[in-house]
Image (cartoon, rainbow, N blue to C red):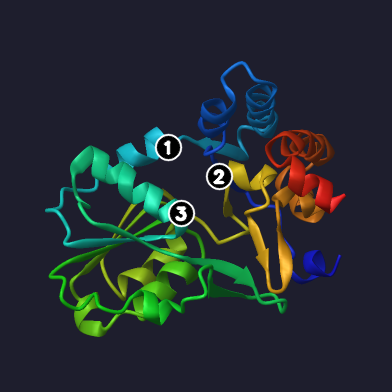
Amino acid sequence: MADEATYAAPTPRVLYIHDDLSDAVRQQYGPASPAAQLAEELLRLVRRDPQRVVVLSLAQQLELLLARGEHPPFAMALGIGEAGERVARQLHAHRGWFPRIRRLDVTREEDGRGGYRLVSLSGLPLAAQVQGLEAYPSLAVVDDTVFSGLTLRTVLQALPPALRARTHAFCLRAVAESLPAIRALCPISAGFVAHGRLLHDVSMINASGLVRRIAIRRAGQPPQAFFERPAWMHAWFPGHAEDVIALCRRLNALLEPAAGARAG
């Protein structure tokens, strides 16, 4: 596959998986449902090598982030995508930091040449989505993950410098190597922080991306789930990748039956 050849994934020393799947499936389908049982089985399977694959819970990441320090309420909070908005609401529920939250409808997309770019999901350019914020005396920008930092950097760079000087960034998890470039733009509070070289020592994914076609966005093509990139799965789960892929396919058939029929 051209995409796999262009976007090769080395086997990381440690792969961190954010479990955003178990609770969501239990809530939508019921705790005793076949989907919930398969989700639990999948999380057990990916933990087969606990020295190399670490599953992170939402609770532990929130606890770490909330321990970074208190903040007065921000006049406005921007949640990057659905995930960033969700994190902003979770933090507000605990501390009341974000009484006003606006979602930025942007996401990272493969450019087909081995790189990525930030694109709008709504058709409204990022520059237009951040217009009219200059009047706010304080601004928070919230993302779920800072991996390479491309998404958060691009959003921060779209802000006027005077506004960026009044901005604080937040994320649930981050790769330490990517944080200095963010801190050069504004302060950032991160929950769980992984140390090591990007991709080679540490990598981060969401469990939902393993089974839902939301993880990989490609220009002019339908989005993919991670299980549809077998080379990545073999890099992340050496020795039992085929078992993980098979289980992902079974769960995807329950979660996205219509999409599966189209893909077939």
Image coordinates of residue 29 in percent, x first then y, are: 59, 26
* Amino acid marked by disc 2: Tyr
Disc with the residue nearer the chain's start (3 vs 1)? 1
CA distance separating discs 1 and 2: 13 Å
Image coordinates of residue 2 in percent, x first then y, are: 84, 70
The crowd level at tag 2 (other Cα within 10 Å; few <14, some 14-19, many 20+) is many
125 to 206, vertically: above or below: below
**Secondary element type, mark 3:** helix
The crowd level at tag 1 (other Cα within 10 Å; few <14, some 14-19, many 20+) is some
* Most foreground residue, 24 or 142: 24
Please tell me the numbered disc located at residue 58.
1
CA distance separating discs 3 and 2: 21 Å
Please tell me the numbered disc located at residue 113.
none
Identify the residue position indicated by label 3 in the image: 82
* Most foreground residue, 132 or 9: 132
* Amino acid marked by disc 3: Glu
Image coordinates of residue 127 in percent, x first then y, are: 39, 81
Disc with the residue nearer the chain's start (1 vs 2)? 2
Q: Residue at x 61, y 59 (%)?
A: 199
Asked if residue 163 lies left or right of residue 148, the reply is left
Image coordinates of residue 100 in percent, x first then y, are: 23, 56
Please tell me the numbered disc located at residue 16.
2
Q: Residue at x 57, y 36 (%)?
A: 21
**Secondary element type, mark 1:** helix
